[in-house]
Amino acid sequence: MTDDTTSMTLLDRARASDSEAWSRLVYLYSPLVRHWCVRWGCPGADVDDLAQEIFLAVAQGLPSFRRDRAGDGFRAWLRTIARNKRLDALRRGGRTPVAEGGTQAAVRMAQAPDPSTDLDEDDPADQVSALYHRALELVRGEFEEKTWKTFWRTAVDGMPVDAVAREMGVGPTAVRQAKSRILRRLKQEIGDLID
């Protein structure tokens, strides 16, 4: 990544067709997309194909994605695309003649996502946490081990600054600086992508 793109968010870089940014975006969000696909009844063998369709639609629609209003979050937008692609797949599958009624009809009805479901209902805190952890993995190699451990103990483990300072053999200011440096780098990398 060159210095002129460092301040751009991951989303902006993906909009600019930066292949590294796309790889990072897919790395961050593919587990969540796959989770949604499985939850919506996509057969295991088709999950990869559906995820690929979803990310293709994201690539095509990303230039028009905006955060103009409260609630215009990337994950909500992504989930809408995923749900629509799953519904498309179900419609395509519906073109194949299948016996009406019985177990087969019940299975298909159970696979259809409920469009009235609240977008955040299927997005619990542990999924958001998983996104943050994956984003942290992306920037970890840029920091010395001691700086990383200092950050981790305060930001992730939730230890008080003074306790981490004693543990690491540094002053409280160094602890706050380590945390701030890594959070700032994370913000540069992904911006407000994880909303």
Image (cartoon, grey):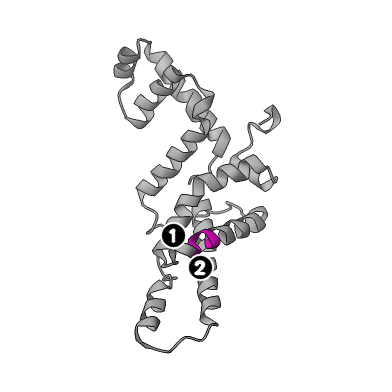
Q: Is residue 41 above or below residue 108?
A: above
Q: Quadrant of the N terminus?
A: top right
The reply to whether residue 118 is in sight is no
Q: Which residue is mark 2?
A: 86
173 and 127: which is toward the camera: 127
Question: Seen in the image, is 102 located left or right of residue 4?
Answer: left
Mark 2: few/some/many CA within 10 Å (<14, 14-19, 20+): many
- Of the residues shown, which amino acid type is indicated by label 1? Trp
At x 52%, y 77%, the residue is 93
Does the magenta run of residues contain 140? no
Does the magenta run of residues contain 48? yes
Q: Are marks 1 and 2 in contact (CB under 8 Å)?
A: yes
Callout 1: SS: helix
At x 46%, y 40%, the residue is 134
The magenta-colored residue range is 46-50
Q: Residue furthest front?
A: 45
Q: In the image, which disc is placed on residue 36?
A: 1
